[in-house]
Image (tube, rainbow, N blue to C red):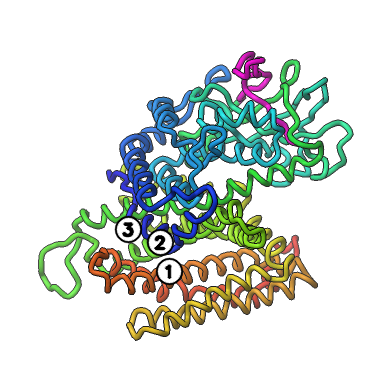
Amino acid sequence: MSSYNAPLKDMQFVIRDLVGLAEISALPGFEEVNADLIDAVLGEAARFAREVLDPLNRSGDRQGARLAEGKVSTPDGFAQAYRQFVDAGWNGLAGQTAYGGQGLPHLAAIPVAEMWNSANLSFSLCPMLTSGVMEALRAHGSRDQQARCLPHLTTGRWTGTMNLTEPQAGSDLSAVRTRAMREGDHYRIRGTKIFITWGEHEMAENIVHLVLARTPDAPEGVKGISMFIVPKFLLQDDGMPGELNDVKCVSLEHKLGIHASPTCVMSYGEGKGAIGYLVGDENRGLEYMFTMMNHARLGVGVEGVALAERAYQHALEHAKTRVQGREIGQGSGDRVTIIHHPDVRRMLMSMRSRIEAMRALACFAAAALDKARHHPVDAERRLSQALIDLLTPIVKGWCTEQAIEIASTGIQVHGGMGFVEETGAAQYLRDARITTIYEGTTGIQAADLVGRKVAFEKGATAFAVILQMRAVDADLAKTEAAGLASIRASLKDAVDALEAATRWVIETFQRDPRTAAAVSVPYLMLFGTVAGGWIMARAALVAHAALSDPAADREFMKAKLATARFYAEHELPRAIALAREVTGGAGSVLALTESQF
């Protein structure tokens, strides 16, 4: 059984040499963030992931979370690991210093989050949701709410959840029925929420639930939703947890994967009513929740990167140790490990090249988020915000869809051994399967990308990104290296395809949004595929230049050139087919009537 080892060299390369740590360090508040600090943080996080979280992954999957008399018990070792996690300060890595956080940029926090997710996705979902609650309260909570909640959430002494979905609602939040009745300075909440990740557990002193509900005179639909803070334990005058609120977990979902993560059905107000506190104004809850949700969407995209990396490492170790068959062309030579077989090499290269592209794109998005928050020039902040708005559904949708494919390929590398639970390869596919559904399915991400991002602004940000993609061509043209020439040719064709599809989406959406929606997922996959090829082309340029530096890690740089070329030659050609699907495939999607299905 393989153990997790964080891909530190690639993370450092992406942060320092590809995305550009120097540019982030120049932002106000990040002046002390340098390569030495980042390397120290990544190195210590890698140790924690390997030594503390990874050993609990398989046992947690087998044991699962358990419910008895309204109380959830996490798998053996989880509570102790969470206490170590909190005591080491990991929960507040990117948290505001005013509330006890370390204030590091997202460019540092995203690779660290990848490590947590790779080592133990079930565990890492808890702090991921807590960070989302912090984000929502930072943006929309009152000063008193921030003062009461954010210090404890930042340190991790308290955890947080988001409560949207109900049995009859699903992703359609206009159907939310949970009710909130005003009572003095608070509200009484009554209703049932489902699919609440880490909704109940024993690891923290308190749990802050952010709950969507309707007040009695609220308008129908999504315009009538408000957001409330509903703590597990009511707060005393000193801010510490006191009496148990009228909130409880009534059941745990039996899931395909992430068994160690308690996914709860939460009941609010079975007795006198759960006490909740309004966040912001009534009827603006969906707007506030989207602050948390967009933050979480980027985090879920990173989960895709992480699970893909873990599946790759597992498959790679198997390929290096599994002896089967003889090497092609060697006649009756000795039997060899399966990594000697060309098709196994193809699968491993496909996994690795896509993971490197996914990781780089996620970090590129993280840097855009840092600039949107911290750049001193207002115009630059607005441009960076538009960029992160565009990239969020792509990172979330594309990276998670890739994760499922990559985890499935990992099973294929194992052959029949991958289909049995004992090898552990199947867990990564089971765990990855939820990521395309979390925080809005891939179809929802694609609808957001096509409608609210690309068509709404008539492609302004999308074309700006495409312009950056085209700028790489001039740099690739300056060298006669065979690998870079191949990358250049593939990238040009792919960018042409993306631009043509983008123009089609904009024109079509204006007159017939249903037709554009029919091919929105292929468009999202097209954008992700080309963005991955673009950023891998940039990585190839950096690696090629580094080979002339005697101090460079030549083996790493040569490997980076190889994976960039593989991506260009094996993954980027998909862009042509995807573009054809976008521009010519909507009609067949909508061809059948309901009765014909």
Residue range in magenta is 227-250
Residue bearing the label numbered 2: 356
How far is the residue under mark 3 from the one under mark 1? 24 Å
| Residue 413 circle label | 3
- Amino acid type indicated by mark 3: Val
Q: What secondary structure is the magenta-colored segment mainly? A: strand
Residue 127 shown in magenta: no
Which one is in front in this view, the residue at disc 2 or the one at disc 3? 2
Q: How many marks?
A: 3
Q: Do the residues labelled 1 and 2 touch (CB within 8 Å)?
A: yes
**Residue positioned 42% across, 54% down in the render:** 308
**Residue positioned 61% across, 72% down in the render:** 464
- Give whichever of 59, 90 is nearer the camera: 90
**Relative to 554, 122 lies left or right:** right
| Residue 536 circle label | 1
How far across and how far down the image is residue 454, in percent?
68, 67
How far is the residue under mark 2 from the one under mark 3? 19 Å
**Relative to 86, 423 lies left or right:** left
Q: Residues within 10 Å of mark 3 (few under 14, many from 20)?
A: many
**Element under label 2?**
helix
How far across and how far down the image is residue 3, in percent?
29, 44
**Residue positioned 40% across, 46% down in the render:** 115
Q: How crowded is mark 2: few (under 14 residues within 10 Å), some or many (20 or more)?
A: many
